[in-house]
Amino acid sequence: MSLLVAACMLLNATSSSAQTLCDPSKVPYLVHPSKHEWVTSLDIGGGWITGLLAYLPPDYNTSGNKTYPLIIFFHGSGVLLHSNPGLCPIFEDQPEALVNKIEKNQFPTSVSVNGNTYSYIVISPRYTSYGEPGYYSDKVNELINHLIANYRVDTTRIYLTGLSAGANIVLDYISSSMENARRISAASMASPCFETWRQPNGPQIIANAGVPTWFLHCVTEGAPCNAAVGWVNEINASSPLTPPRYSFMTPNSMHLGYPQSLPYCQGWEHDTWTALYDQNFVPLDGAPNFYEWQLAFTATLPVTLKSFTARLSNGKVYLRWVTTSEKDNSAFVVERAGGEKPFTAIATIPGSGTSGEDVVYEYVDDQPLPNLSYYRLKQVDIDGRAHYFDTRKVMNRLTNKRLAIITPNPFTAGPAIFINTDKKQRLSIYITDMSGRVLSTVSGTYEAGTTELSLSTGNLPRGVYLLRVAGEGITETQKIIKQ
């Protein structure tokens, strides 16, 4: 009996060890299945981002076309010192970083603010380099565009946050241009070292754009990582539409225990993120914690887009979008891209100036590109400022006879899925495992032609699945593979 018990104990220990995803001495709680989707083999910003961790809300796969607030978390430069080029260093570098709060069940699955309840998408990209002066705003824009195209993001609620060098990246982005600042709903920066002289017009840009900011800094930390002081002072001197929030932390002279110690400097003076990402952090000003604070803000865009669709029918692409409000809207520029090609303008549609009613716009692309292509709207104000809306995908395969088209297949993350029907009809689409258990589903009435479908594959582990379509007397099943 003792030999049997010993064998069982050894088997259990081996099984437990096999489930560990990263270095167990640093992140023992990170075991399979992770609460994140691990996305690799990306090429964003010319190889600057090679992978990312994606946390999706619990109801993401069952909520149809519902959109969610997005937090983008930028790690510190310590991750770059790891020899491991994968995603584990994002967890291993700082144990109280946002990704670890999620894995340790210390992250709120829902947050209620002003009578409304929200759940966050959290994206943590792995960037591969950081050097002074650290101008990365174009690469961050490419990342945001990628996330909007591949996840159901509420584009009025995009929040940036970062620690140390990650805070520098956030600060660089929101101070680089009015367009970038207005794209973000709020930004929080734990111990930034990006001084104002690196972006001389930055404080004025942030002040004029009105983007809400939160700076955290320990008083005992010196230059350059006391940069928060200069930014707060210069933003306030620029008559900001939204004054910055500032957590100026002092040493814990009373030796308070957790959680009363959170508003004070931690053991390492550079560490202010332990406080920022803790649900129990109540700053000395008594204001809301990180998760509640940022939800009080939305991006103020001059145009509110109610819908935007792209549909292929009879060899043409039909674009249709509806606005519910417009202010000083000069025009919409329709842009198109195919494969690895950049977006180019193919049409300009005059805007409605200022309007408080639904306005419908339509455009037909008579000569669409073959295979997979992308369409997006660029809205231009009367003063020339531009704002981009979500990207739509179109599949133009003349010989395809399937009801459902998925590309690529096999896929790693965010494949494009299309419904291809010769008449208007109601269809139900399912992803199941090989035993028939439904893992994700969506139903709707689809117009004749090829239409992009919103069906999540984010939480699926690697494996073989079935994509099944059922309609009016028709069914189709095909095998799909997630790598």
Image (cartoon, rainbow, N blue to C red):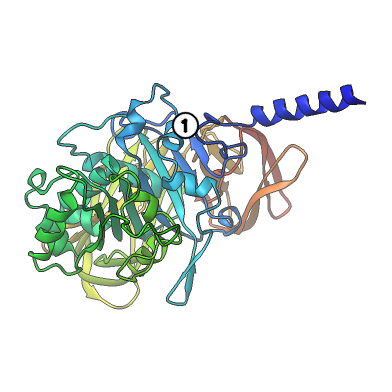
* Residue 145 seen by the camera: no
Q: Quadrant of the N terminus?
A: top right
SS state under label 1: helix
Within the image, what quadrant is residue 261 found in? bottom left
Q: Which residue is mark 1?
A: 88
Q: Position of residue 342 (x, y in %)?
A: 27, 36
Residue drawn at x 35%, y 63% as measured from the top left: 294
> Which residue is farthest front?
254
Q: Amino acid at mark 1?
A: Cys
Task: Answer left or right for 164 relative to 223.
Answer: right
Q: Examine the rendered structure and indicate whether residue 223 appears above or below residue 334.
A: above
Q: Nearer the viewer, residue 215 or 355?
A: 215
Q: Examine the rendered structure and indicate whether residue 125 appears above or below residue 287.
A: above
Q: Position of residue 465 (x, y in %)?
A: 67, 36
Residue drawn at x 11%, y 49% as measured from the top left: 196
Q: Quadrant of the C terminus?
A: top right
Disc 1 residue crowd, few under 14, some 14–19, many 20+, Cα 10 Å: some
Task: Answer left or right for 216 relative to 464.
Answer: left
Q: Nearer the viewer, residue 123 or 195?
A: 195
* Residue 249 seen by the camera: yes
Residue drawn at x 43%, y 44% as measured from the top left: 394
Q: Examine the rendered structure and indicate whether residue 218 appears above or below residue 247.
A: above
